[in-house]
Image (cartoon, rainbow, N blue to C red):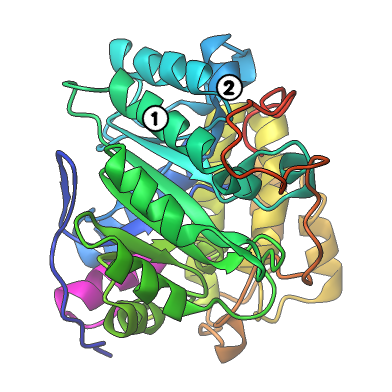
Amino acid sequence: MTVAADTRPLRIGSIELASPVVLAPMAGVTNVAFRTLCRELEIARAGTVSGLYVCEMVTARALVERHPATMHMTTFGPSETPRSLQLYSVDPDYTYRAAKMIADENLADHIDMNFGCPVPKVTRRGGGAALPYKRRLFGRIVAAAVAATEGTGIPVTVKFRVGIDDEHHTHLDAGRIAAEEGAAAVALHARTAAQRYSGTADWSQIAALKAHVPDIPVLGNGDIFEASDAVAMMAETGCDGVVIGRGCLGRPWLFAELSAAFAGRDIPTPPTLGEVAGIIRRHAELLAAHFGEDKGLRDMRKHIAWYLHGFPAGAELRRSLALVRTLAELDDLLAQLDPTVPFPPAATGPRGRQGSAASVTLPEGWLDDPDDCTVPAGADVMHSGG
């Protein structure tokens, strides 16, 4: 099957991508093991690596303080290029120091700033999706990252949501401010923080942002679960690229399908259950290499549930896989799957967390003054990864 796409390369500052596709940073998911797997599958199934694969979020303060877990999260594969790192910050000073550290120590080739996290433990302290409401503080944080990387060729991009809720949209101001402060591109998750991951992403807000910020690339995020969704988003909104989050959970080969779609080639046939079992095994091997076998296999358990979504596997086997502890045990369990089962229609469509909308927890008085530049207390005292 071919999905028609009027595509073009995506340039983000000094970085040019053959395909306008970006892997969204996801806590506990987009570590070096997952990114390596996605890249391997894109090469195997589409013949190339054409997009941008972003590391899971790290906290600017934890990076500056060289927190061991945070430093481990900045691991990139030996052939991984461009190396893309997402920073979470609420403080211009720590932002500058972290971005300068990335540049001085050659830790990454691209910095993405996170202002989209809707998790209550983040927003209640003024971080993530809550922060763009404070327009001047938001601008100072972006400006700090840009200043720290000036002359290095490391572009800074900014990702945010439509706003806090339907009464407090911030995306148009955030896009304008980011562009004015020197961001190389902006990305919009077309939901408010109150929506979290529920309901439907409002792609019209991506179109509105593109019209409002015409001079830098605007990337769209939200409800891309198939290659055809990405093509449709770009056609409907005029955005310059797409950011893929939940759609690739348990489907790391989605990037090969996107690569083919944007190159006008036939989309590769989805894998059989036997091929998925091989991908699971490779993913587990990469996680074991990154974390050690014990932690790697524990981390693998959630991925297995996503991989087997829609496939016939049986309740007992699923329970055993949810408790897998070693690569040898995983091999024995995967051998019980029927390798001939084709990829089922039930495995397509939405996946990952959805939940329901909820009011956004904010610091007391947060909405009183959007021009207040006070750095929210304690918002950056957290482990990286969300």
**Image coords of residue 141 (percent x, y):** 46, 30
Q: Quadrant of residue 66?
A: top right
Read off the magenta span: 251-268
Nearest the viewer among 72 and 58 is 58
- What number is the disc on residue 21? none
**Image coords of residue 161 (percent x, y):** 54, 59
Which residue: 56% across, 39% down?
A: 371
**Image coords of residue 340 (percent x, y):** 53, 81
Which residue: 61% across, 34% down?
A: 372
In the image, residue 309 sits, relative to residue 61, either above or below, namely below
Mark 2 lies on a secondary structure that is: helix
Q: Left or right of 1: which side holds 321?
A: right
Q: Left or right of 321: which side holds 42?
A: left
Type of amino acid under label 2 = Thr
Q: Quadrant of residue 386?
A: top right
Residue 268 in view:
no
The N terminus: image quadrant:
bottom left
Q: Is residue 292 magenta?
A: no
**Image coords of residue 19 (percent x, y):** 21, 62
Type of amino acid under label 1 = Phe
Q: Left or right of 164: which side holds 259?
A: left
Which residue: 44% across, 55% down?
A: 173
- Classify mark 2: residues with Cα within 10 Å, few (<14), some (14-19) or many (20+): many
In the image, residue 103 sits, relative to residue 382, either above or below, namely above
Label 1 sits on residue: 76
Circle 2 or circle 1, nearest the eye: 2
- Classify mark 1: residues with Cα within 10 Å, few (<14), some (14-19) or many (20+): many
Which residue: 74% across, 24% down?
A: 378
Residue 382 in view:
yes
Nearest the viewer among 79 and 335 is 79
- What number is the disc on residue 70? 2
